[in-house]
Image: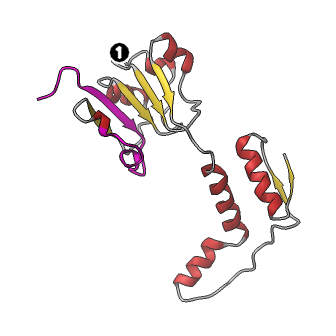
């Protein structure tokens, strides 16, 4: 039997099915019903239909925008939680006007720079092509590009951009921002 004060929580866009393992949800046992959506709904009307019954929404970064025109049509919504410190896809003034509390998890900020460098190194050293060759019984088929002496272009020197530039300097790269 569902308790009258049982809250309904939606977790949106959990493509990697990690939301329920990335936090301790046990304090909500018996207090909330959690529904995790692993797909993405791009149509506003379909998203509204999906979210109408929920009291709280947990969004995974900036995958599902929540502008005023959507928030105004979610009468039960009282709380939005975002994974990560900032989320430009949530209309904060609209949420405030509608009495919806918005909160965010902390983030150490290392994911984006690490992924950036993984991609730069993979491109410079042709790693996808070389892995494919190796898996087919081959060996090295290309010559990679040295990063030392190359120029790294960084758009913005905020928290993430500074980390990327610092690693580039460690590789002996020049950088422009």
Residue under the image location 60 percent in, 45 percent down: 108
Q: Please say if 125 is above or below 174.
A: below
Q: Is residue 96 left or right of residue 12?
A: right
Residue found at the far left of this picture: 1
User: What is the x, y in percent for residue 52?
Assistant: 32, 23
Q: Main secondary structure of the magenta part?
A: loop
Where is mark 1, residue-wise? 75
Q: In the depicted view, which residue is nearer to us: 167 or 70? A: 167
**Judging from the image, what secondary structure is the residue with disc 1 in?**
loop
Q: Please say if 122 is above or below 94.
A: below
Q: Is residue 10 left or right of residue 4?
A: right
6 within the magenta span: yes
User: What is the x, y in percent for residue 172?
Assistant: 85, 64
45 within the magenta span: no
Residue 117 in which image quadrant: bottom right
Residue 48 in which image quadrant: top left
Q: Residues within 10 Å of mark 1 (few under 14, many from 20)?
A: few
User: What is the x, y in percent for residue 174?
Assistant: 88, 57
User: What is the x, y in percent for residue 23?
Assistant: 40, 43
Q: Tag count in the figure?
A: 1
Residue under the image location 60 percent in, 71 percent down: 128
Q: Please say if 60 is above or below 96.
A: below
Residue range in magenta is 1-26
Q: In the depicted view, which residue is nearer to us: 106 or 79? A: 106
């Amino acid at each position: 039997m569902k308790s009258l004060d049982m809250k309904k929580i939606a977790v949106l866009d959990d493509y990697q099915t990690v939301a329920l393992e990335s936090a301790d949800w046990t304090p909500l046992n018996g207090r909330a019903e959690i529904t995790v959506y692993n797909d993405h709904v791009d149509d506003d009307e379909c998203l509204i239909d999906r979210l109408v019954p929920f009291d709280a929404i947990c969004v995974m970064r900036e995958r599902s925008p929540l502008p005023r025109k959507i928030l105004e049509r979610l009468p039960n919504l009282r709380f939005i939680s975002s994974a990560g410190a900032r989320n430009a896809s949530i209309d904060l003034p609209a949420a405030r006007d509608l009495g919806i509390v918005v909160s965010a998890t902390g983030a150490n900020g290392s994911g984006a720079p690490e992924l950036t460098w993984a991609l730069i190194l993979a491109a410079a050293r042709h790693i996808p092509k070389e892995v494919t060759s190796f898996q087919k019984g081959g060996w090295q088929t290309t010559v990679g590009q040295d990063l030392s002496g190359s120029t790294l272009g960084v758009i913005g020197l905020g928290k993430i951009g500074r980390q990327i530039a610092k690693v580039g300097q460690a590789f002996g790269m020049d950088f422009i921002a």
